[in-house]
Image (spheres, rainbow, N blue to C red):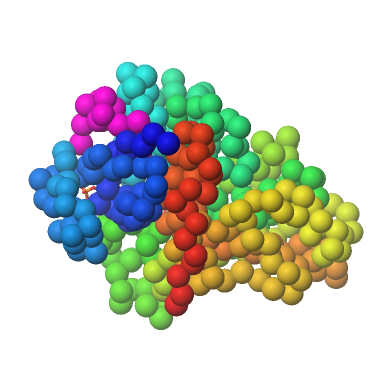
Amino acid sequence: MDTIRVGIIGATGYAGEELVRILYSHPAAEIVNLSSKSYAGQPYSKVYPSYKDLITDDCQPEDLEALSEEADVIFLALPHGLASSKVTEKVLQKCKIIDLGADFRLQDPDLYEQWYQVPHEGKGLLKEAVYGLCEWKRDEIRKTRLVANPGCYTTCSIMSLAPLVKEHMIEVDSVIIDAKSGVSGAGRGVSLGNHFAEVNESIKAYKVGCHRHTPEIEEQLSNLAGKPVTLTFTPHLVPMQRGILAVCYGKLTAPATWESIAEVYERYYGKEYFVRLMAKGEYPETRWVKGSNFVDIGFAVDERTGRIIVIGAIDNLVKGAAGQAVQNMNLLFGLAETLGLEQAPMFP
Ligand SMILES: NC(=O)C1=CN([C@@H]2O[C@H](COP(=O)(O)OP(=O)(O)OC[C@H]3O[C@@H](n4cnc5c(N)ncnc54)[C@H](OP(=O)(O)O)[C@@H]3O)[C@@H](O)[C@H]2O)C=CC1
Ligand SMILES: CC(=O)N[C@@H](CCC(=O)OP(=O)(O)O)C(=O)O
């Protein structure tokens, strides 16, 4: 097996660091570049002392074009609005790109500009960008040069709802997603709303009715449904380091039992290594997926109201970011999808 040469831009952020953690042990990958704006010239192990004696390289100033000559794949783990101007045809001719940010996720650039309030500088590349939700898009991912790695809330929500939407088993205007995230979902940058005293022993909803993952979930579910899906998405910040729990409600289009729904989930996910379906009466918890690339999914049918409640749990930094990005890399290079990603969850 040839070694895949990997560059990480934005290596000092939480998603970048999680890429480093996973790729460090990946049997077919070698990290050849760790780029940073603020820490260029400093040892990576000084930014993250957990890598003392493991990674001796310094952070490099960012130079995507030069790096594309050296690397087979480059991960971008930057705030939204930057990747769309950095990824060019010239870069893509030399290497593959996996963008962990949002710039290439929405197919419609107007929708992007409306929700993100920044201009999209790479409109010409949107057509070939593939939304990297591996379990649903693997054939397209294998053929592309540019992967738009999904967001953390979106991964958890879409994975939880997709079989029902695809099979037209829930009303497309009835979906409500009530999701909770650990604080690492907000990144390493310090902000008033995210420091310890502000989040500890409290829980808050935020960006109510206006979170930018709403159009991303709607667009992907609409593609699966073959008609527009509109939904309500409410994110919450909870005092834990990692994890997303998405509790998704929908009105069933026809009466169903737990067993009949379970049969559908089994059909779509029964052979998926990273999807773990719960038994009747069992529901996912973030602590059971922490540090792993698993998506745990459980559900209940409320026969009284005709509603279904589907609950999904992921680690936001793994299946919600770096783990899924490495899963995408494995697909791009024809490797086993699970390579380097078989870590058991960590507990507590
Ligand atoms: N955290 C999460 O759970 C998830 C994050 N994502 C996405 O991944 C991306 C990175 O997120 P995350 O790691 O959390 O964010 P962080 O704030 O932790 O890290 C951001 C990184 O981007 C770099 N950076 C910031 N501004 C600039 C700039 N102007 N030019 C170049 N580099 C810059 C920083 O570099 P430095 O400080 O070294 O200068 C740092 O390495 C985002 O798009 C985010 O939405 C997606 C799913 C989940
Ligand atoms: C807790 C928290 O703040 N989470 C982030 C989502 C992280 C993520 O997935 O962001 P992107 O889709 O932009 O990549 C937020 O709500 O903005």
Q: Is residue 209 shown to the viewer in this render?
A: no
Q: Is residue 90 left or right of residue 242?
A: left
| Residue situated furthest right in the rendering | 255
Above or below, 221 against 306 in this view is above
Q: Is residue 188 shown to the viewer in this render?
A: yes
Q: Measuring from the top left, give residue 42's x and y in whole percent.
A: 11, 50
Would residue 68 be counted in the magenta stretch? yes
The residue shown at (49%, 45%) is: 327
> In the picture, residue 86 is in which quadrant?
top left
> In the picture, residue 259 is in which quadrant?
bottom right
Would residue 67 be counted in the magenta stretch? yes
Above or below, 114 against 182 in this view is above
> In the picture, residue 306 is in which quadrant?
bottom right
The residue shown at (29%, 69%) is: 195
Above or below, 314 against 6 in this view is below
Quadrant housing the C terminus: bottom left
Viewer-side residue, 46 vs 305: 46
Q: Measuring from the top left, give residue 339's x and y in whole percent.
A: 48, 48
Viewer-side residue, 27 vs 134: 27
The magenta span reads: 62-75
Q: Measuring from the top left, give residue 260's x and y in whole percent.
A: 85, 59
Above or below, 282 against 9 in this view is below
Q: Measuring from the top left, give residue 168's x and y in whole percent.
A: 80, 45
The residue shown at (58%, 58%) is: 295
The residue shown at (66%, 36%) is: 223
| Residue situated furthest front in the rendering | 1
| Residue situated furthest left in the rendering | 41
